[in-house]
Amino acid sequence: MKQTFIALSIIAVIASCGDKDIDIPLPPPSSGSTMQLNGLSGETGETGSSARNSVFVDFSADKQTSILRSNWDLGFYTGSEFKIKINNTTGAYASVTNKTDINIVGSADTVGVKLEFNQNEPSSEDLTKMDDFNGSISGIRLTASANESENKVFILNRGTRGGIGTRDYMKIRVLRNGNTYTLQYAALAATSFKTAQISKNGDGDFVYISLDNGNTLSSFPAKKDWDIVWTYSAYKTNFGGMDVMYPFSDLVALNVLNNVQAFQALYANNEVAADAFTKFNKDSLSKYSFSNNRWLIGSSWRYTGGPPPSPAPFTRKDRFYVVKDPSGNVYKLKFLSFATEDGGTRGKPEIKYELIK
């Protein structure tokens, strides 16, 4: 009864305003919180270092959203361009053929084509089968052209990295139909295909599709409703003087498509950093410059092994990060734990963040 009364009162207020503009106040941003990220899906065989969820965090709403990495295969850009993103969080590979008839593409089209990652023989060629790791729209390699003859069939290895099981290769062709994508897809050995229409609507930068059924995923947060994402992902490292693909866990990316920026504040030791975090305020910001590097945080917040210090793994407590969200709110962020060795749980890192007023 109380809820009904409130709803009717709001309607009455709106009606009484006639044609006047109404300013509906937004809730104030969160002043901060401590949060344990739910990277573990609970699936059989899952390990903390291969946690199967990506976790999106919205500081101003004190909200996290966990998405199973294997639940999506393609992301269709909702902006002005027609771009199709593949899933770097599973280590997916895509290779474009020279054919436009999806039904005649088969296993013969994979002969001599590198479509799988070999940890023992990393190659710079791997990077040509993935989207650029910088997260830019220009770094997405697959497009749908207005000229139908330019839309070649591509073969997709859906990815097996980070504890994802082996799945059939898929063959895919994407066309344009006005402001809509037309997706044709089938298992590589199939002689017929399925079709799905994907409209450029919704409140995300991408419409995400699973090739298990051609369905759209509605669980992703809106494009301005997240600041960072913690995930397993393909990335790169230097090997023999060249960049090669290198997938690993616990990577933290910024929502750079929606102007999230950050910087790292690094100190001499843990104690100095803890004191600096407490005292860090609006006046402290002038000493630093924000960066729009998607991987500004990356894996720099934790240590998993190698040369001293030891024991490993542990959370680096000699640093913290300052993050500006899509609305201009600025938060200081530090990581508290992520492994048994530092009192945490692998796959469920704990963070603390505070609004800088």
Image (spheres, rainbow, N blue to C red):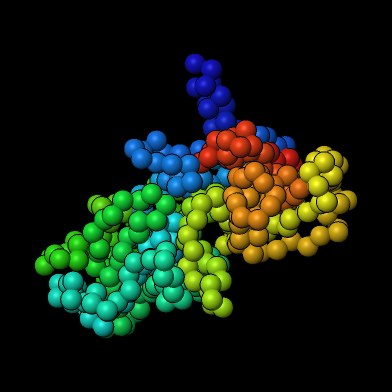
- Tell me what residue is drawn at x 63 percent, y 50 percent: 303
Choose between 4 and 13: the one closer to the eye. 4
**Horizontal relation, residue 218 to residue 256: left or right:** left
Q: Quadrant of residue 43?
A: top left
Query: Splitting the image into 4 quarters, where does residue 136 fall?
Result: bottom right
Give me the residue at 83% from left, 51% from top.
268
| Residue 219 position (above or below residue 110) | above
Tell me if 276 is positioned left or right of 162 in this view.
Answer: right
Q: Residue at x 55, y 68 (%)?
A: 237
Counting from the top left corner in percent of width and height, residue 356 is at 78, 44
Along the line of sight, the residue nearer the viewer: 122 or 55:
122
**Residue 310: x %, y % from top left:** 67, 46
Q: Position of residue 193 (x, y in %)?
A: 17, 64
Q: Is residue 109 above or below residue 188?
A: below
Considering only vertical position in the picture, is 238 above or below 354? below
Residue 351 in picture, x, y percent from top left: 64, 40
Q: Quadrant of residue 254?
A: bottom right
Number of disc labels: 0
Residue that protrudes farthest toward the top in the picture: 1
89 horizontally vs 289: left or right: left
As drawn, which residue projects farthest toward the left? 191
Q: Quadrant of the C terminus?
A: top right
Residue 53 visible in rendering? no
The residue at 19%/62% (across/down) is 187
The answer to whether residue 183 is visible is yes
